[in-house]
Image: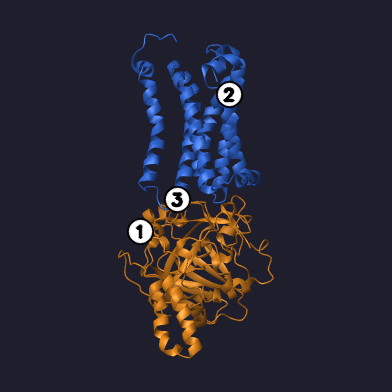
């Protein structure tokens, strides 16, 4: 990676400690939930609190991951790309914990019950499908996988993240649908809408200006 | 012989459900005395068994409101009472916010004095009843009920109040009255979420007349030996223990008698999810989750399995006959 004459923000982004700091920061929600569970600080229904918080953090990391490319372009900070893979993997980390929380706390790890629940309830099915689609993305997140797949195919596969974003919002929407309580759903939908809309808008722009940004790296 | 294993899931009794040995022994003793004709002398100690069942600790946060132990069948469960801290901090009271913690934070603005409940519709003695008059209308009883929320959690709460039937007898519904509607307060000045579109305010609930007259249906003024906290529906609410929690309307301002099935708040919001009856029924799932099991708040460890939900929340012996011949899958 060619480091430009780095100054200011760019210097911070390229600092050797930047990645470890982000790694620790991304683990903080997990650390807090773990500590709070041990010390009985999760309220009257800790199981529900854990499952919902882990779902929230999955969605937040998904938003952060999808924000990297627009921010990188708009703020002209190519160095931001260094963090996208880690953010994506943390999305999967929290998604796995969210699923584990459901399977353990809600379903008592009864796998036939879980299978029946997934088949029976669209809202669970959609959430599970999102996790399932996220799995190959996490599994092909290391450099050798990129080389083995070839950049074009790898990129095609990782465009699944757009579908995953849609499934995540639908899952959240359905979960809240019975109580007509859509404020938070609307906030996340708006954020994801802007992040995906920006990509669509850029793609549809007239060709000459689009050529100004390197298309191979853009998503 | 029916052999139950862990694969059956959820059905093992917890220690709190097992009759204490002392009570069990006393029952035996009672039967022996009955057989020998010496029952009369033993009745006093038999009545004392309630003292063994459990003693509810008064949290000492609000004005005391004591009730005598209820003699209504099924009115005093022996299960472990939920901690007051949980029962008063984990609430669904959407007028004060949709998060479980919101009501405890926001409901301090609710003004519970003066308070009147309007009785109208098909009733011989309509009018406005002041809270003080309602408080004195019947002897306050302590009822320890299971509370099962439609969301899949449950509590055990010691309420203080008297059977709604006592109010109904006093106000004398007309013969044409088939249902009772309960309207709860909807004051945008003190209830921050009454402006939201979560529900069609005011919150309305309803019961069929025979359900309303059932002795287990409670008009509650207190819990844990004290007046109700605002977030739990002060100053007066309904408690219908065999139905999902949302049927038990909070902060009542109007009781209306009608010949038509009331249009209830949740039924209007999502008819496919919340029916008029809303009896606790492990065999009829909510569209988005199973109702077969429940999480007892504050009792199970983090990794404990949920417990099995009981038909009519365990009050089948008392209320089952109200629904004889009804298809409870259709009339959910």
Q: Position of residue B200 (x, y in %)?
A: 54, 57
Q: Residues within 10 Å of mark 1 (few under 14, many from 20)?
A: some
Tell me the quarter of the picture where residue B83 sits: bottom left
Residue at position x 48%, y 51% from top?
B304
Q: Secondary structure at mark 3?
A: loop
Residue B279: tell me if it is visible.
no
Dot 2 corresponds to which residue? A158
Spot the blue chain and give its letter: A
Residue A27 visible in the current orientation = yes
Q: The numbered mark 1 sits on a residue in which chain? A: B
Asked if residue A83 is positioned above or below residue A174 in the image, the reply reads above
Q: Position of residue A170 (x, y in %)?
A: 58, 39
Query: What chain does badge 3 belong to?
Result: B
The span from disc 2 to disc 3 (Cα, nearest Å) is 36 Å
CA gap between label 1 and label 3 equals 16 Å
Reading the image, the residue beneath label 3 is B99
Give the residue at mark 1. B108
- Dot 2: element: helix
> Does B283 appear above or below A176?
below
Q: Position of residue B229 (x, y in %)?
A: 37, 63
Residue B210: quarter of image: bottom right
Quarter of the rendering occupied by the C terminus of chain A? top right
| Relative depth, front residue between A191 and A68 | A68
């Amino acid at each position: 990676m060619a480091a430009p004459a780095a100054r200011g923000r760019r210097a911070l982004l390229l600092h050797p400690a930047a990645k470890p700091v982000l790694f620790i920061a991304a683990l903080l929600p997990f650390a807090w939930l773990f500590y709070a569970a041990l010390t009985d600080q999760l309220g009257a229904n800790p199981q529900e609190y854990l499952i919902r918080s882990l779902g929230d953090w999955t969605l937040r990391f998904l938003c952060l991951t999808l924000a990297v490319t627009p921010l990188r372009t708009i703020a002209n900070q190519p160095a931001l790309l260094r963090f996208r893979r880690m953010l994506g993997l943390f999305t999967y980390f929290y998604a796995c914990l969210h699923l584990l929380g459901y399977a353990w706390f809600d379903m008592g790890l009864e796998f036939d019950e879980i299978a029946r629940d997934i088949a029976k309830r669209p809202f669970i099915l959609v959430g599970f499908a999102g996790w399932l689609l996220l799995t190959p993305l996490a599994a092909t997140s290391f450099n050798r996988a990129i080389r083995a797949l070839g950049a074009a195919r790898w990129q095609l596969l990782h465009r699944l993240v757009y579908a995953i974003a849609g499934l995540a919002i639908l899952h959240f929407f359905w979960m809240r649908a019975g109580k007509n309580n859509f404020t938070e759903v609307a906030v996340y939908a708006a954020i994801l809408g802007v992040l995906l809309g920006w990509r669509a808008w850029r793609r549809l722009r007239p060709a000459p200006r689009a050529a100004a940004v390197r298309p191979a790296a853009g998503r | 012989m029916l052999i139950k294993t862990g694969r059956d899931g959820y059905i093992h009794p917890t220690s709190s459900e097992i009759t204490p040995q002392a009570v069990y022994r006393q029952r035996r003793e009672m039967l022996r005395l009955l057989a020998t004709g010496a029952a009369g002398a033993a009745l006093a100690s038999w009545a004392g068994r309630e003292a063994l069942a459990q003693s509810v600790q008064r949290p000492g946060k609000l004005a005391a409101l004591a009730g005598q132990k209820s003699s209504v069948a099924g009115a005093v469960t022996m299960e472990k009472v939920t901690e007051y801290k949980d029962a008063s901090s984990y609430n669904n009271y959407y007028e004060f916010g949709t998060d479980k913690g919101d009501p405890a934070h926001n409901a301090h603005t609710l003004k519970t004095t003066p308070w009147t409940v309007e009785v109208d519709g098909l009733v011989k003695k309509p009018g406005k009843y002041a809270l003080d008059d309602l408080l004195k209308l019947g002897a306050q009883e302590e009822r320890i009920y299971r509370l099962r929320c439609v969301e899949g959690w449950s509590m055990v709460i010691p309420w203080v109040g008297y059977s709604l039937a006592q109010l109904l007898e006093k106000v004398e519904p007309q013969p044409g009255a088939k249902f009772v509607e309960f309207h709860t307060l909807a004051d945008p000045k003190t209830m921050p979420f009454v402006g939201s579109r979560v529900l069609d305010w005011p919150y309305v609930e309803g019961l069929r007349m025979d359900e309303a007259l059932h002795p287990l249906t409670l008009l509650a003024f207190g819990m844990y030996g004290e007046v109700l906290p605002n977030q739990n529906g002060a100053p007066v609410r309904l408690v219908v223990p065999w139905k999902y929690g949302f049927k038990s309307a909070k902060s009542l301002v109007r009781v209306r008698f009608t010949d038509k099935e009331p249009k209830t708040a949740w039924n209007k919001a999502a008819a496919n999810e919340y029916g008029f009856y809303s009896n606790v029924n492990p065999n009829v799932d909510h569209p988005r989750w199973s109702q077969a099991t429940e999480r007892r708040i504050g009792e199970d460890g983090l990794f404990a399995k949920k417990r099995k939900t009981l038909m009519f929340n365990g009050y089948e012996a008392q209320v089952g006959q109200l629904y004889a011949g009804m298809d409870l899958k259709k009339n959910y």
